[in-house]
Every structure is written in C-alpha cells, then in structure tokens.
Amino acid sequence: MNRTEAEQLTTCAFERLKEMLEGYGNTLNQQHSDALYALVDSMTKMTSGDMQGRYAFGMGTGLGKTTAIIAWLSAVEELQVEGISIAVAASQVEALCRLSRAFQDAGIPEEKIGLLHSKPFNREKAQFDSDYASLPSTDHNERRPYLLVTQQRIRSGELKEFHFYNKRSRDLLVWDESLLVSNHWTLPLHAFEGTRHSLKGMLDEYPEVVEMSRYFTASLPRLKEGLHDTKHNGNSRPLQLPLVLDEQLPEWDGLVKEHKKLLPEYAAACLDFINQPVRVLPTGTGGLVRYDIAIPESITNILVLDASFPIRELARADRSIKNAEDVLPCLKDAGVKLGAQKTFEHVEIHQWIRHSGRNSMLTDFSNERQAVRSVAEVAKTIPLNEGILFFVFKPDQHSTGNYRNILLNTLEEKGIDLTETVDVQTSKGIEKKPRVNVITWGMETSLNDYAYCQNVFLVGVIHRAQLDVAGSFISQSGSLSTPLEPCEIHGLVQNELCHSIYQALSRGSCRVSEDGKARPMKAWIIHRHKEIQTTLDEVMPGAVWKEWKPTSTVPPRPGQINTVAMTIRGHLTGLSEGVERVSSRRVKRDLMLQEVAARTWAWAVKEAIKDSEWLLDGQSFVRAGVFFQTEVA
C-alpha cells in the first residue's frame, strides 16, 4: 500500500478502536489515545514494510491492546486492502476462540479466519477449564490471511503451520502477553546422582549398562565442581559434560526404557542433557539448564502486547525486544508512558499474610479448609448485584478433591445461591451474567469475560519453582554465561508471582479504564510476603492495600483440638509449683507442636485451661491465684 492508503488505514482503525472502547464503557484521555494510535499505526507500518523489528507495548490490561487488533483488521476489510496477512498468538486457547468470534462480529468473514490449537472441543467445559476449547481448530490455515494460533504451537518450531500464507511469510506476528523467545529444560542435580546410584546397583545383574554407569560416574565430579564454583566463586561459565558418540545415545535410551522399573523416573531426562551445552544453576542443591531458540530470528516483525512488560524481568531479559515507548518517536517525543495509562485509587486489595502455594492450599482444602471457609465468609457479605470471580488451583495427582467443587460446595453451605445472575451493560444492551464464577490458574491471562466482576479472590497463588524460573531467565537472556546470583533467583520467583497476581486481578472490573482510572474493584489475596505490594504498585499505581485478618466461625476438627488440649493440660499440670507464669510460645516449643495451625492451637488452649488452675494472660499461661493477687494489688 502507498503512504496515503497507509494513513487512511491507520485513521480508520483508530476511529473504530475508539468507538469500540467507548462502547465497552471506557473513556480515553490524551495519553491513552496517543498510545493506541501508535499501536495501530505500528501495525500498518509493519505490514506495509515501513517498519521492522520486535516491539513491546507495555500498556496495562483492559486498555484496548487486543481490541486494537480487531479494529485494525476490520478497517483492512472495510477499505479492502489486499495482500495483508497476520498471525495472532495467545497463551490461552479460549482467548483465541473469543477473538475469532470477535473478528466475525466486527465483519471479518469467517473463511478468512484460521484457528490453530490442539485442545479438545467442548463449549461448556471451556468456560472454567483451560484444558478445553469452545471452538474447534480449523484446517487449510495456510490459505487464511488472519490466523489465530497458540503460542505453544509457534514455540514447537513448526514454522510451516503458522508462518506462511499463500507460500510467503506473513507480514506480522502479534504476540498477546509476554514473549519468551526460548524453550528451556531444567534438571535437578540429584537426578544425575540418583541415576548413577541405580545404575551402579544394576551392574552385577545387567552388565549391558556398564558404559552408561561409567558415564554418570564420570559426570558427577564435574557437576559438583560446577555447583561449587557457581555458589562460591560466582562462576557463570557453561559446563561441558563428557561426550558420548551420537550412535550410543539411542542404545542408552532403549536401555532406560527396558529397565524403567529399576531406574528413577528422571533417568530419561538425564540423557537429554548429554552432548548439550549446559549451565549449573545455584538453586537449592543445584540444577542444570539447557535451551534452544523457539522464535527464530527469521520472524522479524513482532508486536508484543504485554501488560506485564514494565515489571516482568523475564520478558525484559531479551534485548532483541525494544520497548516501544523508548524508541517510537510518536511515543518518546510525547513522553507517553505505556505502563502508567491508568491509576487504581478505586481498587482495594486485601492481603492475608499466610502461605498460599499449591502445597499449602492442598493441605487446607483437604483438611481444615480454613482458607476456603474464610473466603466464603467474605463472599457472603458482598452485595447481590455485584459479580464475584474466584481463582483456584487445578487438581493434580496429589489432590484429594477438586478445588473448584470444594469451593462451590462451601459457598453453598454459607447460603450463597450459585444460580444467581447480575445485570451487565454490554454493547448489545443489558445481559444476564453469572454472579459467582470459579476458574483455575492457567486462565489468568487474555480473557475479558469477567470484567463485570467487582470482586476477585485469589484462593492461593501460583508459585513457579526456583530452578524453572532461573532456567527461563538464562534462556531468555540468550546466553548460558549470563550471571545469576542465588539472591537474584529469589527475586525472579517473586517477580513471576507478581506477574501472575497482576494478570489474575486484571480479569476483574479494574481492567476497564474510565478517563485514566481503573473501575472500582475489591480483591482478596492470600500470600505470605508483603513485598509484593511494592512491585504491583508499579503497574497498579494508587491501589489501596489493606491487611485481611479472617475470623472463621467454624472450629477445627474436635479430635485434633482435644488431643492438643490434653497435651497442653498435662504439661501445665506437671510444672513445679514454683512456676507461676509460662509463655504460650514456650509451651508450644517444649511440646514440639510448632506445626499445629494457629487456629487449632487457640481452640486447644481454651479447652486446656477450662476448669483448671491456669488462666491465659495475653500470650502467657498464669496460675489463677497469682493472677488475681496481682489484680488486687
């Protein structure tokens, strides 16, 4: 297209975008408008050949980044611009399904839209389970100019599946959310140790594994030396393990499969690190990482629409991705800050300081259910005309039940009607939407279906393992030699956690912007570190943080209370008469009951001193006689 046609396309797309966002209830200030204009203009310039490269637009959630794609493509159709082809990548299949429907609603012909994924098609289950899709994958995608594809499909390396339209490269790849350009694999060092130990024990009966056993025995000293250098000398050099003939590896792979009952389950993964450049990482007892480039340099034109870009260190580790606000004149000269397009002074975030990872939630959901009941107690107080969104973990092989079902049952026990709806103003008029929504971690990005929910609960928070995050950072940096200290790894883990929290909260009403301000919303987060507030303030400036101290009216299991109470009473009875006061903390320590939950301990203490000579004075047990003498005096 010529310059006049390009300017006409950008103008048409921008006007459509403004109209769409205002129809959703957004009002745009000048900086917001400038940022959106720069985005659609970049799409025009990159497809016309006037601009090349990889650019990140770090605009906040709900500011119109994804809507800009719809508006721009509908303008392409309206103006009948020929020859344009793009691919749009998202992490969530359901986000792509919704985008496909949005394309069609905007007047884009269905036959021009491709949808590429591998999820089973089930419209009902897809509403709350990320393992399913509400639309089936399409065929003949190489003949469809507008292709929607999962990020994982692209990262698998099959360029021919998505990158070509009519036998030529697509003009533009739009990447929704963070772009991580590498695939990485990690392995704890104890996997090598365990495999070596098992192989050594097999030698007498299975002599065919002798060469493999020698290899693992020779590798361990190098691995241990590499770990020592990494932890104590700051060494970040790649490690070269002993080499093996390429033709030998298939034979070893066959032996591992043949003797899988005698070998640890990670033995096969160990073979994948042989003859590969690797790096020892200083996490816990140490780990290995290797990686390859998933997004090849041949894909030159990429627009990254990443709300987390201002705070997510993994996303910024790749120096090939340019920050749009730093390099595009229309943004740089106007001083537009993409990450500060709206403030959150009408958003309250209530944080419960306690453990919130998968293991903690597994224990809670399986036993006392203090968190579940506390969440339900708060939900019961929410006005009936307000929507509620809950995030819970997906069940795994260790779960004794379905987190979602347990939460729903608990809400019903508290008298919450799960069939209730709320009236929601949409572009099509007033629609009925479910008041209570429960979705799983894995659905915290890309979706906007729950923007009517003024209340969001994170019943647990997704935590990534240190080794996984460290490996991802090294691979994203593009060099095995990138320095990485243990303290930095802890920071990366917390940073990833903040990214997940921000994305999850942004599924609620705070994603909608009105004249530069997020719509009112209340959130309840369970997490043990207050430090997350500092990071989240960067992308949610002005949010009001409050401490959440639940008070559950449901006692722990009576049997457990009685057992602990009897133990406490026996201890107090056995104290010498000279002991008039003893701290509750010391009793708990002396009885080695530190693992007893605080709520269980509180109930047990009350039971233990009932009808006894002991009273509770603050945080100490005190003999009743001494207490009253002190009071009289």
Image: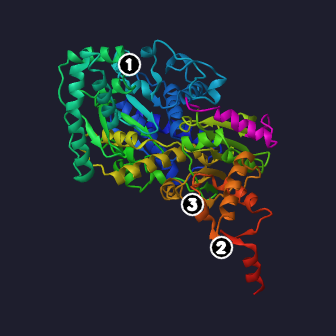
Amino acid carrying label 3: it is Asp
Residue at the spot 34% in from the left edge and 39% down from the top edge: 471
User: Magenta includes 156?
Assistant: no
Image: magenta residue range: 395-424
Foreground residue, 505 or 79?
Answer: 505
Helix, strand or loop at disc 1? loop
Residue 260: mark in rendering: 1
User: Where on the picture, by quarter, is residue 252?
Assistant: top left
Q: Nearer the viewer, residue 275 or 52?
A: 275
Which residue, as the protein is rendered here, is positioned at the far bottom? 633
Q: CA distance from mark 1 to mark 3?
A: 46 Å
Mark yes or no: residue 527 visible. yes
Q: Position of residue 87 (x, y in %)?
A: 43, 26
Q: Is residue 247 left or right of residue 604?
A: left
Question: Looking at numbered disc 1 in the image, what kind of residue is underneath it?
Answer: Lys
The reply to whether discs 2 and 3 touch (Cβ–Cβ < 8 Å) is no
Instruction: Give percent across and percent down for residue 605.
Output: 71, 60
The residue to which callout 2 is attached is 581
Q: At numbered mark 2, what does the secondary structure look like: helix, strand or loop?
A: strand
| Residue carrying label 3 | 590
**Foreground of the two, 30 or 339:** 339
Q: Position of residue 474 (x, y in %)?
A: 31, 41
Q: Quadrant of the C terminus?
A: bottom right
Callout 2 crowding tier (Cα within 10 Å): few <14, some 14–19, many ≥20: some
Amino acid carrying label 2: it is Arg
500 vs 51, nearest the viewer: 500
Say whether disc 2 or disc 3 marks the residue closer to the N-terminus: 2
**Residue 519 seen anywhere in this rendered image of the structure:** no
Mark 1 or mark 3, which has the lower sequence index?
Answer: 1
Q: Secondary structure at mark 3?
A: helix
Q: Which mark is residue 389?
A: none
